[in-house]
Image (tube, rainbow, N blue to C red):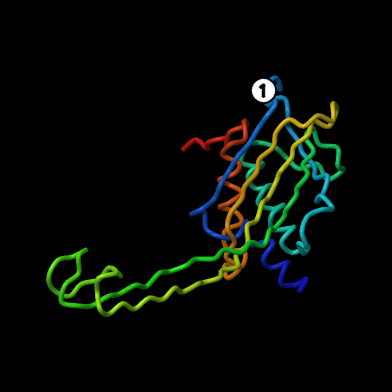
Amino acid sequence: MIRLLSILTVAVVITGCSSLKITYNMDTTVDFSKYKTYSYYGWDTASTHINKFYQNKIEYAFADELGKRGLSYDPMEQGDMVISLFLAVDKEESVTAYNNNYNYGPYNPAWGWGYGYGGYYASPYIYGNVTYEENTYYNGTLVCDIFDRQTKKLIWQGVVSKAIDPSEHGKYIGKTISRLMMKFPIKEIKEEK
């Protein structure tokens, strides 16, 4: 069960970007140009069963995006910015009902003369059937909190959430993090050609 949750948990950041929802907030009084280095605080302990393999893939994707912005990782954990990550998955259920009403007869007030569909009371032949379909799906949310090391204040928060497709193992982590980091105030440094 824990292994299944590990796979499903990470799927939020590994599925395609079709239903990706991104929100962010930041402290507008902060001068982000002063930040040159970053370090990781680690994963929030409330993160839902994520294994080390996927933690590393997510951290590498953030490192790639931050590197494109001229920021470098401080292995001594003294970076100007401190990054904390949180990942959660919620299991949800939905029920869909399909009403299959057909009626046949020479006269149907809903359609006029001739055979037709509609489930109307005047037809001599009414067939009704309701089909219920239960679906289980997973919604995942990845939260990236970035703090100023000196003030210990939260300066930026990015949140990405998505319905999970566990069949896409690790495929879209970089793309998802890239989409999230488009909202970060330090933009990518464009290489001159």
In the rendered image, which quarter is residue 170 located in?
bottom right
Q: What x and y, as percent, mark residue 142? A: 68, 50
Q: What x and y, as percent, mark residue 94? A: 57, 63
Q: Residue at x 27, y 68 (%)?
A: 118
| Viewer-proximal residue among 45 and 189 | 45
Density class for disc 1 (Cα within 10 Å; few <14, some 14-19, many ≥20) is: few
Note whether 90 is above or below 160 in the view shown.
below
Q: What x and y, as percent, mark residue 111? A: 18, 65
Q: Residue at x 63, y 57 (%)?
A: 139
Q: Residue at x 70, y 19 (%)?
A: 29
| Viewer-proximal residue among 140 and 109 | 109
Note whether 68 is above or below 105 in the view shown.
above
Q: What x and y, as percent, mark residue 66? A: 66, 41
Q: Residue at x 50, y 72 (%)?
A: 132
- Outermost residue toward the left in this view: 113
Position of 192 with respect to 22 (left or right) is left
- Outermost residue toward the top in this view: 29
Kind of residue sitting beneath label 1: Thr
Position of 122 with respect to 162 (left or right) is left
| Viewer-proximal residue among 90 and 21 | 90
In the rendered image, which quarter is residue 36 located in?
top right
The quadrant the N terminus occupies is bottom right
For mark 1, give the secondary structure: loop
Q: Which residue is mark 1?
A: 28
Note whether 74 is above or below 44 in the view shown.
above
In the rendered image, which quarter is residue 67 located in?
top right
Position of 165 with respect to 9 (left or right) is left
